[in-house]
Amino acid sequence: MPEIFALILLIVISLGAAVYAVFTKKTITALIASGIISLSASIIYLLMAAPDVAMTEATIGAGLTTVVFLYAMKHVKGGEDD
Amino acid sequence: MIKYLLVFVAIIGIGYIFLPFVMEFSTPTKLNPLATSYVQGSVNELNMPNVVTAIVVTYRGLDTLGEVTVLFLATAGVGFLLKRKHDMVNHRRKCSEILCTGASLLTPLIVLFGVYIFAHGHLSPGGGFQGGVVIASGFLLLVMANISFHFSHNLIHFSESISGFIYVLLGLAGLVLLGANSFLDPRYLPAGKWLDIVSTGAVPIIYSIIGIKGGSELCSVIDSLQHGGTEL
Amino acid sequence: MMVLICGLLLMLIGIWAMLIKKNIIRIIIGFSILDTGTHLVIVAIGYVKHATAPIVDKAVNISQNAEGGIQVLGKVVDPVPSALVLTAIVIGLAVTALLLSFAVRLYKVGNSLNINDYEELKW
Amino acid sequence: MVNPMLLLAMFLITAFLIALLDKLHRKISIYTIYAVLLIASGMGFWQLNTLLYNPNLSVVVFSAGFSAPLSISLQFGVVEAVLVALLNLFGFLGASYLYRRFLQSGAQAIALYLLVLLGANGLVLTRDIFNSFVFLEILSIATYAIIAVDQNKNSLVAGIKYMLAGGISSTLFLIGIVLAYRYTGTLNIDTWLSLSPIKTPGYTVALFLMAIGVFIELKPFPANGWALDLYQSADKGVASLISSVNTAAILFLYYKLMPLFTPALLEILTGAGLISFVFGNLIALRQKNASRLLGYSSTAQTGLLVFSLGALSLLGLPQGMVLRIALGLFITNLFAKSGLFWLCGVTKRNNLQDWSVLRSDSGLLIIFGIFAVALMGFPPFPSFFAKWQIIQIFGASQAWMWMAGLLIGSLLEVVYLMRWLGFAAKGESQSTLEKPFSKLFPLMVSALGLASVSYYLTLMYPQIGTNSIYPIMAFILFGLIDILPVKLKGVLAIAALSLWGWFVLLPPLPLMGQLFALILVGGSIVQIFAFMRYQGAAEGFFPSLTMLIFALGNIVLASTKLQFFLAWELMTLAAYLLILKGKKARVAALLFIVFSSFGAYLMLAGFSMMPNTVEGYLIILQANFMAIDWLPALLLGVAFLIKMGAVGVHYWLPAAYSEADDETSSILSSVLSKAGVFGLLMVLILISRFVSSSSISMMALGWIGVFTAFFGALMAVFQEDAKKLLAYSSMSQLGYIVVGLSLMTHLGWVSALYLAVNHLFFKGLIFMAMAAVFLRTGTRNMYEMGGLIKKMPIAFISVLMGIIAVSGVPPLSGFGSKWFIYTSLLEQGRYLQTALVFFSSAIAFLYLYRLIHTVFLGQAKPNQKDVKEAPIWLIIPQGIFIMAIMAISVFPNIITKPLSLAVGDYIAKPEWLNWDGYNLVLNSPTLHGNWNGNLVMYVTMGVFIIPLIWLLLVNARTQKVKQFNIVFAAERPYKPWTTHFAYNMFAHYEKALGFLVKPRVTAFYKGVAEGFHSLSATLARIYTGNGQTYMLHIFLYTIFLYLLLGVK
């Protein structure tokens, strides 16, 4: 039962973060929101009994992708916002 | 305005496409025959507890080889797009002492942890890619701490090339030792004892190589992104 | 089921972001949300009710059968989608990184990341 | 056999190690990938060879020591081997093209290039669906990255658009794969195929997503904006790679997935492919940018392949045959399209009109021509046979919509490619090109490769026979010896053609066939002399000319539909090339080829609705055992009428006849139009059992002929340009022939054929004589000539003889032919038509009078004081024609009797038609009359000689006056030539009849052309250039197809 609640919570978090990522003005917040989505997704994977995927999503999806975005944004300073 | 309307239509439409699938979807209560035979085969024929690893490294090893290639491609592509005309000196301020010391202390530990992850890929969750990312994060720490790493620049490229090469060679070894249908078959090495780190044939070696390969590719991507694009 | 719908919704939100955001970086973020959603859908499809991870350790019931082989009795989730997602995640990263470096390069050349500023090729 | 795993391993090892190799030397890495690609291609060929000898060899290889579906399997069968061989070969050629880029850009670009090929090979080989996704991603990502070799803004933008589109489609593909896995429990295509069909909506959705993911990558209209931008902006080597290797691999993936689709899904995608073909070509119509045009063309060709694969499978053809046909299209496209992209890179010209730079380089121009002609599906290229087969199959299965779409698209393709070719061949430019060997090499290999593949495939084609090869052989051989002096080539050509005609062509033919063989081949051989008037080598004439004449012979000799069509297309192509030699013939040649292709496609459609001919019999002999329906008869009839220039479809005729070189015009008018006559006769023979003179269809045909005769004559009257006058005159004469044929009576046909023979002689004669005049005076406007009788008496005599013959006054043969036509018309009671035909003859006097009067009589022009008689080479054919005319005028029976015999094979000779010595006697219930050519000649001669003697006597007393120099009294007229009496000579008639010759037909065709252009422009508007809009297109397109599919 607690697992179900956790799952619902995570789903709500990730959907909320996704909508926020679309609406927010600043790109950096959108990026962080997308990182949050990946993180919650990785916990969802753990709950779905897929630990391999969870690890990969956490390291690559949430971690590395965000870093890559950050570096890219460093190079486009001034152009990253609408 | 009309554009927003069309976007709205597109989103609704795409959702609508999935509708029939969602309507008839119910979480299954048992495995399909293919998955069952993977589970049985992984345990019985490969002596490998982690079925996902068995699939990733052995059964569908060709996919993983392709995946490694994709990563290699991304590295090459990013490097190609953001290549430097000549090595530039990094004019950033030196890091604070704490960060420097912390980074140089932590990095070996992180790398070690990465190695642990991919070396145990066949037994526990995790494996080459995850381990590779961990190694890359160690590298990232070095980069952020701005510890000079020109020693590592060539090393990264070298390990990229050589580990990829070894990976293919390990695959070819199956072909040579076990027959025409055995590309990427790890069973030319003994299966070993259940749950032993040196078991399941060549899988630990292959996964380690994938880890090194993945790690160095990711380091290389970070390297390119860190410097790149400053020169036209 | 919930996860499946969550994944689909994430996909739709990602598509939405790709279609209305003007900034290329934001479009790429939309793309990575789309990717994450796809992965969730795939894992959801592999899930089996009340099953454990597909790692045959102490948590999974096993038994020896007559020929000495091991029979896995405990329920595990379908390992195939997991394996596919592993590949898909890495590919997603590769595409994202490449897209970003195109964007960086483009910014150096065109000094803008607004997708509406690049409409010279047409008709 | 070759283990395909080794192939992949080789690519991977090289790609991984290339960075290290590159540290040694850049060139080492470049040559390494050359070697790898060549070895890979060789593996394909080797495997193909192995499989040819051991067809039962197992071709599936598993990985990891487990069999599928547990592991991933690769299949290296015949098709895969062909693809591996070809793709890697093109990979090698493309790499060679990119040599300089590689030198600059380094190891990463080289590795990326190699990985594009790895992706393509993997995609071809794998039998696992998720594995195809991985290879698809390798292919795509490598392609994305390599776009950046050219780091300008446009290619970066195009790259981003491409990546977004590719990202979306591969996401759809991936999700489709996994959804489908939920139902099938397997990822292996073969296992999947063995499953019993699953019929739930969810599964259909899964299949749909999978299919659409791949389909979007194939750049369907209108979801292909990203691809067009890419083709336009990327380095041409990369664009070529995408259009050939990349597309081919994805197309093969689509082909592998096809058997999984439900019929409804396949039908929709097939239709979408056809739409893509038609609209891609339509939008290409107005493109001025060469690369973007190629982009549209490329998407169209991909659409065509998708369409043909789908359509043929849906019609239930065996897979082997589907593949064979598709391979024909595919190979042509592969060679030609990549070649054209490379050529774009060599010329470095974006604007189509600037392609005239190729004029300075005949080698490149020939290569360009080969590619363009191959793409359009002219023989002997594989696409010709493929299209032929597809249309035949559609005809047999009554798939009319598909056929119409395919033909319309092909016609549009002809328009823009030929226009482009015209710019290249006829534009004005003096600049030269920089041609590095690394870029020339792939061009040459692919042109030669295309040629040799075509040769091989043509030989393999069972039904075409040895004769069909001759035109092509002649083209090649005379192309090779084109540097020899023109006189020598002329002698060789005459000798070869005469020998072939005498020993090969004539013997198997029935009388009617022999007659046409003599008209078509004999008539042309005589005119070869005229080409020998040129100095030096006069390159470019003889290959086309000999091809034309051989093809003409083959038309008569054809015993199957394919042989006929092949010869017909070769004839058209040869004539096009000859017309294009004219100085200002760009537009004229384009009109000719577009109308001819339109006709050819109607013919193709008509043939497909016709039963197969009995092999070994000439088509014209098959009337007794072949029934042909009204629709094919109509289509074929229109096709042949186009070639004859019947009214309404004559638009091309004046332009082509007048702008071609004079010798060519002569052949076009006197000989080529007879090919149309032959065709029409053939159709009439095949339907002769069902129609008679009084059938509505034949009455209609009669009216077409009458109006052609009438309007042709009328328009000839108002021409200033002597060649245009002759062109319209030809049209008019062919109208008479059509009228005669439409009678479906013995007498009618004899009269038509008699006129056809006559027309050959007199029109050839006049054209040759006028050619001499144009040559010497340097103009074609009649008001700029005058008084040439003294300078060029032979030309005068020829023209005089000719116009007497044309106008149908005694004593020459024209009189007989007109008499024949009137008699046979009256015999069938077609009084109204007789009247109008008679009136046309009267009009003919006007233009003929103008021709001889203004050119040869009157005052000589001061600037034409020193014109000389024509060169001997132009006089030889004139002499032959004059002799022929005299012979059949004095002894008409030598030709009318055989004609009657020949016609008698099809329509029995009525008893009331007889010969009595030199006298031809008609004694039908409705008609009595006789014609004695011999007697007519003597009487007329007598009637003429008496005044002539008198004139000569009188003339002795006349005084010769020098020509005056007319001094203008006051102002010099603004346009002095308008005061010449020959200028606008028949202005008064124009006042009366001018409303009849208003350029309605011109206006109509201009309207059609403009309509298509504006449609093309409007459609192109959807490609806004905005990457986001393109993504929206993709989604909306997906939804649209989904709604079409209608999953419940």
Image (cartoon, rainbow, N blue to C red):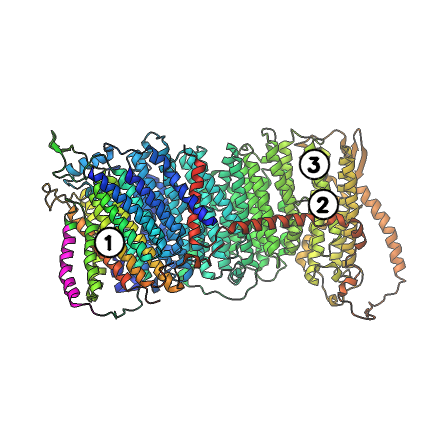
User: Marks 3 and 2, Cα distance to the nearest angstrom?
Assistant: 18 Å
Which residue is disc 3 drawn over? D700
Front position in the image: D758 or A69: A69
Can residue D392 be seen here? The reply is yes
Q: Residue B212: x, y in percent?
A: 19, 54
Amino acid found under the numbered disc labelled 2: Gln
Front position in the image: D812 or D133: D133
Q: Say which of marks 3 and 2 sits in front.
A: 3
Q: Say which of marks 3 and 1 sits in front.
A: 1
Amino acid found under the numbered disc labelled 1: Gly
User: Marks 2 and 1, Cα distance to the nearest angstrom?
Assistant: 85 Å
Sort mark 3 into few (<14), some (14-19) or many (20+) by Cα contacts within 10 Å.
some
Specify the quadrant that holds the C terminus of chain D: top left
User: Marks 3 and 1, Cα distance to the nearest angstrom?
Assistant: 81 Å
Q: Residue at x 59, y 39 (%)?
A: D507
Q: Residue at x 18, y 35 (%)?
A: B40
Give the secondary structure at mark 2: helix
Q: Residue D400: x, y in percent?
A: 53, 35
Which residue is disc 1 drawn over? A63
Does residue D121 sit above or below D752 in this rendering? below
Which residue is disc 2 drawn over? D733
- Disc 2: host chain: D
Q: Residue D256: x, y in percent?
A: 36, 40
Give the secondary structure at mark 3: helix
